[in-house]
Amino acid sequence: MKRLLAVLAGVCAAVLYAAVTLVSAQSAAAATLTEVTNFGANPGNLRMHVYVPNTVQSNPAIVLAMHPCGGSGPGFYSSSEFASLADRYGYIVIYPSASKKSNCFDNWSDASKVRGGQTDPVSLMSMITYVESQYHGDPNRVFATGSSSGAMMTNAMLGLYPEVFKAGAAFMGVPFTCFPNEAAYSPGGNSAPCVGKTAQQWGDAVRNANPSYRGPWPRMQLWHGTNDTVVAYSELEEEIKQWTNVNGLSQTPTSTDTPQSGWSRRRYADSSGAVKVEAYTIQGAGHSLPSGGMAAVAIQFFGLTGASQSPSQSPSQSPSQSPSQSPSQSPSQSQSPSQTPSSTPSVTPSVTPSDPQTGACRVSYRPNTWNNGFTADITVTNTGAAVNGWTVTWSWPGNQQVTNAWNATVTQSGTQVTARNVSYNASIPAGGSTSFGFQGTYSGTNTAPARFTLNGTACANG
């Protein structure tokens, strides 16, 4: 009887251990967007949400990501790629929510144009200080980005606190101190309110907010669509004037190129060759940025795509935080010509090509080609049994060569290409899909692969 009881005790312990392990694994499977309610001084009456990826770095960079008018922090989290990129690169994202004038960030009041003014910028600085304290955020790697109203605030935050921010990326914004008052700011459209000033005048606006500061000044990346009817495309030139002047650069770009079809890029480098300002013109685009992999280009401009630190587990949530929404599976990020390979370690597939077939699959292959280069997005739909760990293979019909990838670890030997899942997208449920993409080069004709396989099973095209 004693022997039987000992055996039963061992079995129970094993079952309990397995259950605890399963629960721990499930809880660690997905990071969550979390609201912080007590983050410090908040004269702007803003809300704060923070996204901390499971593979957060030990001293992570901080990205302040700000929504357009009418939006919210959780909305910008869902509609942009900054969180899925954080899963890959280990930085923390702050998503603030504005409360004034159709949920626009205050870019018009006198208080918004001075350091310490009792409005939105002070609230945003409190959020940054909170993340530095609670999550060991790196004060030397703080960045700002945003769309429309959030882009305007990006310009303002870098103008007001240049010693805090290393760089910014503004999508469809206007220069710092553009609006003289609230009456001049219209959430439904600001045709061209901030044109006509010289580069010196725009630069002085930043310098006058920081009369004792001597640099270095933040780097700036600027984006605008030529068909924007809400914030005029002409504002891009005014932003260029401001940030080239602040950084002591000529108005003439040091280089121009077309990274991909429809994108025109101007770069402004200093005497050492370091790019301090770059501006993207998106042909035909309206008031809809960032899109099509632009967030990934911004994150690379920030310098966050390298593996400078080893990931660690996410810090525990503080008592003042309440969970909000869970992120979806990382979205596909299309047309990202400047991305580098993912530094996230891949998960070894539990099913290999030599295993029995696990069911049917379907692959959609969507390339975007320019002279001697291309990007492609691949969506794999699993129409069979659930897959935990996946490998997709194909062969090139020409001389295509993959140079970098996102949402998968991609290797190539001759014409044979193998794409394996990364840590956050290993599972594809029955009927579910996963997406990844890559950049490549070619000569001659860029013909699509004839066939793909998923864990050794041939997939249908389409």
Image: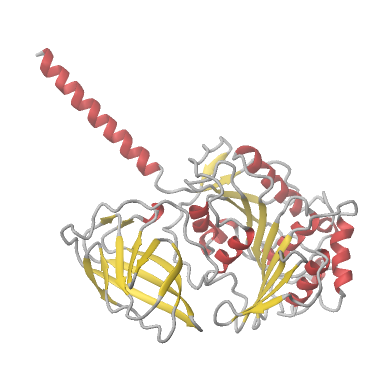
Q: Residue at x 52, y 62 (%)?
A: 81
* Residue 66: x %, y % from top left: 64, 59
Asked whether, in this view, residue 202 is left or right of residue 381, the answer is right
Q: Position of residue 74 (x, y in %)?
A: 55, 56
Q: Front-most of 210 and 104?
A: 210
Number of numbered markers? 0
Vertical relation: 416 (above or below) 48? below
441 sits left or right of 177 in the view: left
The quadrant of the image that shows the N terminus is top left
The quarter holding residue 233 reads bottom right
Instruction: Choose top left, top right, bottom left or bottom right for residue 203.
Output: bottom right
Q: Nearer the viewer, residue 278 or 379?
A: 278
Image quadrant in which the C terminus is located:
bottom left
Residue 314 % position (x, y): 50, 41
Instruction: Name above or below for residue 318 compared with residue 190.
Output: above
Residue situated furthest top in the rendering: 2
**Residue 188, how many percent across, how many down?**
69, 74
Q: Describe residue 17's horizontal placement relative to residue 286 as left or right.
A: left
Q: Residue at x 40, y 53 (%)?
A: 424
Q: Residue furthest left?
A: 1
Tell me, what colour scheme is on the image? secondary structure
Most extreme residue toward the front, as rendered? 414
